[in-house]
Image: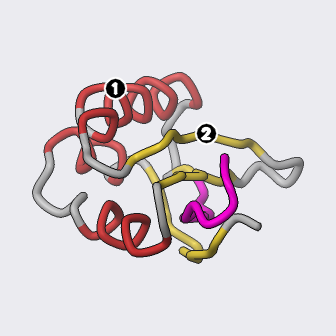
Amino acid sequence: MLPGNGVEIGRFHLREGVSEEALFSAWTRMTSEYLSGEQGWRGQRLLKLQDGSFIDLAFAVNPAYSQSLCDSWAGNPACAAFLDLIEPVSIEFGTIF
């Protein structure tokens, strides 16, 4: 990551009955089949926190691309499959220094 790159931080919980394996499979599909082909996307990481919640970190060439990529999830089947498994808590956008 370079200074000026954008980041999206999405915090969420799994929906009841969803396994971590199902989550990781859907997340991997979303990043490999959709996001990896999008202009401005620089990478993505999935974190599990001690309290059992998760953080999805998405990196982009700049903050505007971070927002644009997040907005582009609507209507994409791979993104929808991931979103169906989670209960969103918060989404934040920022810039890498």
Q: Which residue matches tag 1?
A: 32
Separation of marks 2 and 1 at Cα, in angstroms: 12 Å
Relative side of 1 to 81, left or right: right
Q: Position of residue 48 (x, y in %)?
A: 74, 42
Magenta includes 10? yes
Q: Position of residue 4 (x, y in %)?
A: 61, 66
Relative side of 28 to 90, left or right: left
Q: Quadrant of residue 97?
A: bottom right
Residue at the image position 10 percent from the left and 58 percent from the top: 75
Residue at the image position 46 percent from the left and 56 percent from the top: 61
Label 2 SS: strand
Q: Position of residue 83 (x, y in %)?
A: 35, 53
Q: Which residue matches tag 2?
A: 45
Identify which amino acid the numbered label 1 is placed on: Ser
Above-or-below relation of 33 to 92: above
Principal secondary structure, stretch drawn in magenta: strand
Front-lying residue, 51 or 46 = 46
Residue at the image position 35 percent from the left and 44 percent from the top: 82
Residue at the image position 38 percent from the left and 34 percent from the top: 31
Q: Is residue 81 visible?
A: yes
**Residue 56: mark:** none
Spot the residue most to the left.
75
**Counting residues from the N terminus, which is met first, the one under dot 2 or under dot 1?**
1
Q: Residues within 10 Å of mark 1 (few under 14, many from 20)?
A: few
Spot the residue most to the front.
3
Q: Quadrant of residue 37?
A: top left
Magenta includes 17? no
Q: Which stretch did the figure color magenta?
A: 1-13
Identify which amino acid the numbered label 2 is placed on: Arg
